[in-house]
Image (tube, grey):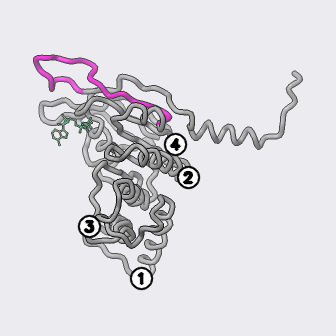
């Protein structure tokens, strides 16, 4: 589904990412870990299309990733900007209106009713059904991230990008959010890329874990070399394809095992 071919990203003389060649299948849940500043968010921005590669190719279904965000890709940041003067429901609807019509867009009539129905359904799914009329300042950190996830999912993306979405949350709330993300990953058939500082979280949530680190280092010129993917590990037990294969096996008639 997604393929990076010898991908490089530089900002001026500073090499941030180098020589990244990797491919990802639909339905994988990739977690990204690495030291602070090594380029994990930059990689997500390349996937989102808000940054372009300095060299190399990034392909989605064999085509270059479009260098602007579109409805294929939704993103959730650690600090999400919501409109403080709008309710939870209106915030999600605004995300949809903007995605469709740009910053000056409003929805009317049938389009508005449809958007409202879809937003309410999603907000129930992420556990904010009781909070439709609240304003952002009335929400807890966990509720705000649920709102951000609903906003990202409203356009029905195939790829969900999560940039340390739970970094600021208490451990108990994080556990709830992990369940929510795993449920949404399966029910929305998403391919997920999630940056985390928490290796345990990376191992628990992902089907595949990438470690970003510098492949080579020059102490005299720290910016001369960028990070690559130094480890690419299969992790987790809840891989959807395996789950589906097991479910399909269970539906098959029992075979004779005599020979
Ligand atoms: N627009 C930019 N212009 C110049 N340098 C940038 C820009 N964006 C990021 N950088 C630099 O690129 C490097 C990688 O940044 P990035 O945010 O991708 O790291 P990260 O691994 O996500 O870090 P963290 O874990 O701390 O969030 C940093 O040194 C940063 O200063």
Mark found first going from the N terminus, 2 or 1: 1
Q: Which residue is mark 2?
A: 187
C-alpha separation, residue under disc 4 versus residue under disc 2: 11 Å
Closer to the chain start, of discs 1 and 3, is: 3
Mark 4 and mark 1: Cα distance apart in space: 36 Å
Q: Residue furthest bottom?
A: 109
Task: Tell me the distance, in whole angstroms, between the alpha carbons under discs 1 and 3.
Answer: 25 Å
Q: Mark 4 — residue?
A: 27
Q: Is mark 1 within 8 Å of ligand 1?
A: no
82 vs 147, left or right, is: left
Q: Of tags 2 and 1, which is closer to the observer? A: 2
Does any portion of residue 3 appear in the rendered image?
yes
Pointer 1 residue: 109
Q: Which quadrant of the figure contains the C terminus?
A: top right
The quadrant where ligand 1 appears is top left
* Relative height, residue 245 to residue 81 (above, below): above
Residue of label 3: 84
Residue drawn at (41%, 56%), measured in percent from left and top? 146
**Which quadrant would residue 20 be assigned to in this image?**
top left
Looking at the image, do the residues carrying marks 3 and 4 touch, with CB atoms under 8 Å apart? no
Q: Main secondary structure of the magenta part?
A: loop
For the point 38% across and 80% down, the residue is 108
Measured as percent of width and height from the top left, residue 48 is found at 33, 47
Which residues fall within the magenta stretch? Answer: 206-226
* Mark 4 nearby-residue class (10 Å; few <14, some 14–19, many ≥20): many
Does the segment drawn in magenta span residue 222?
yes
Q: CA distance from mark 3 to mark 4?
A: 34 Å
Nearer the observer: mark 4 or 2; the answer is 2
Residue 190 located left or right of residue 199: right
SS of the residue at dot 4?
Answer: loop
Q: What is the secondary structure assignment of the residue under circle 3?
A: loop
């Amino acid at each position: 589904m997604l393929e990076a071919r010898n991908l490089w990203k530089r900002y001026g003389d500073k090499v941030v990412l180098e020589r990244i060649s990797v491919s990802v299948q639909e339905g994988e849940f990739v977690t990204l870990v690495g030291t602070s500043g090594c380029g994990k968010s930059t990689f997500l921005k390349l996937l989102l299309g808000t940054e372009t590669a300095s060299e190399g190719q990034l392909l989605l279904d064999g085509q270059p990733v479009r260098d602007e965000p579109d409805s294929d890709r939704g993103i959730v940041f650690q600090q999400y900007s919501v409109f403080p003067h709008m309710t939870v429901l209106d915030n999600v609807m605004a995300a949809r209106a903007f995605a469709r019509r740009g910053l000056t867009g409003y929805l009317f009539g049938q389009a508005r009713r449809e958007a409202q129905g879809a937003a309410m359904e999603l907000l129930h799914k992420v556990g904010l059904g009781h909070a439709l009329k609240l304003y952002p300042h009335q929400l807890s950190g966990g509720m705000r991230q649920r709102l951000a996830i609903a906003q990202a999912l409203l356009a029905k993306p195939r790829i969900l990008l999560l940039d340390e979405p739970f970094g600021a949350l208490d451990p108990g709330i994080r556990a709830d959010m992990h369940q929510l993300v795993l449920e949404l990953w399966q029910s929305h058939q998403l391919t997920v890329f999630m940056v985390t500082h928490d290796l345990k979280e990376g191992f628990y949530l992902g089907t595949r874990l990438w470690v970003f680190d510098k492949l080579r280092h020059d102490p005299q010129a720290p910016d001369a070399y960028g990070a690559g993917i130094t480890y690419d590990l299969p992790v987790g037990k809840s891989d959807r394809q395996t789950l589906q294969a097991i479910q399909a096996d269970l539906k098959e008639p029992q075979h004779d095992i005599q020979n």
